[in-house]
Amino acid sequence: MDTQNPNVPSHAHTPVTGKKHPNRRHPHAGLVHDNTRHTARFTVIGNHLAQHAELSLLAIGLAVHIQSLPAGARIDIKTLAARFPEGTTRIAAALRELETHGYLRRVRERVPGGRIITRTISCNQPGHGRTDALRPAPGKQTRPPGSKLLPAVPHPAYPAPALLRQATDLLAGLHREDTRLLLSTRDVAHLAPGVAAWLERDVSATAVRHALTADLPPESLHRPAALLAHRLTAQLPPPPFRAPAPRPTAPHRFQTCDGCDRAFRAPAPGHCRDCRSSLPEAA
């Protein structure tokens, strides 16, 4: 056969040869590729994703699924949980993994009419994408040319509008604690989900504000938003323990009174309340 595996590098680029080659195995053992060239309905996936050393297998599979979807497809947690057997908790964790490593970005935009929506950007090569992956809505502040992307921040499992508004107000007021923390609208929009993730975990606004503003370096802050993003991620508290709700106790079954044949509820057969009160032992 003269079919070659396109994933195998040519000998000219192989740094080691002979018996020292790390992939050299017994000719009758190990993986064998039976590849057929795709001509329709295929997605190109980089080995940096398929063989990522830090992503979980669920996150890698979810990234492959997302990259195969057409533009405009819904990839919220509930939609993905309805599509796959994994629950919302595992899918939410996998999405956070992809955000941490740059394969997903969430952008909040104000659309005509004043409503704020969240767009999700899928990056097939983190760090190599276009800065204008989405056309900004009117009035949206774009990233200045040459500026660095902010680090990813955690996201709440259920981003309620009221929670995000509280997070936005908290960030917008940080400059009152330290004038160096005067943030732009773009920075606040990026950091707000991270603050909301803290608030969702029963952390008070005062505690979040203290975590972001305490022990700041004395020198000037070159990128205050990047410092806040790091703190929101590195110091994220664990979810609060919630005791399971007590299971409701089933009502007692109907019994027939041994004295008057009246039906009454009790754990075992016997006498109803009226008959028990007239028994000699009751007197």
Image (cartoon, rainbow, N blue to C red):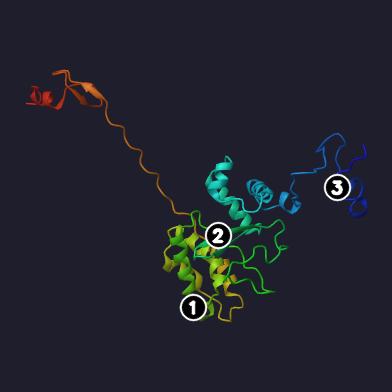
Q: Are marks 3 and 1 in contact (CB under 8 Å)?
A: no
Q: On residue 233, which mark appears?
A: none
Q: Of callouts 3 and 1, which one flags the residue occurring earlier in the amino acid sequence?
A: 3
Q: Of callouts 2 and 3, which one flags the residue occurring earlier in the amino acid sequence?
A: 3
Amino acid carrying mark 2 in the image: Thr
17 relative position to 253: left or right = right
Amino acid carrying mark 1 in the image: His
Label 2, secondary structure: give it: strand
Q: Residue at x 54, y 58 (%)?
A: 155
Residue 123 in which image quadrant: bottom right
Residue 98 place in picture, x, y as percent: 63, 55
Alpha carbon distance from label 1 to label 2: 26 Å
Q: Name the residue that disc number 1 marks.
A: 175
Label 3, secondary structure: give it: loop
Q: Residue at x 66, y 51 (%)?
A: 55
Amino acid carrying mark 3 in the image: Val
Residue 267 place in picture, x, y as percent: 25, 26
Alpha carbon distance from label 2 to label 3: 40 Å
Q: Of callouts 1 and 2, which one flags the residue occurring earlier in the amino acid sequence?
A: 2
Q: Residue at x 89, y 52 (%)?
A: 16
Q: Are marks 1 and 2 in contact (CB under 8 Å)?
A: no
Q: Is residue 242 above or below residue 173?
A: above
Q: Is residue 231 visible?
A: no
For label 2, the crowd category at 10 Å Cα-Cα, with few meaning under 14, some 14 to 19 and many 20 or more, is few
195 relative position to 33: left or right = left
Total tally of numbered discs in the picture: 3
Q: On residue 8, which mark appears?
A: 3
Q: Name the residue that disc number 2 marks.
A: 118
Residue 186 place in picture, x, y as percent: 57, 71
156 relative position to 202: left or right = right
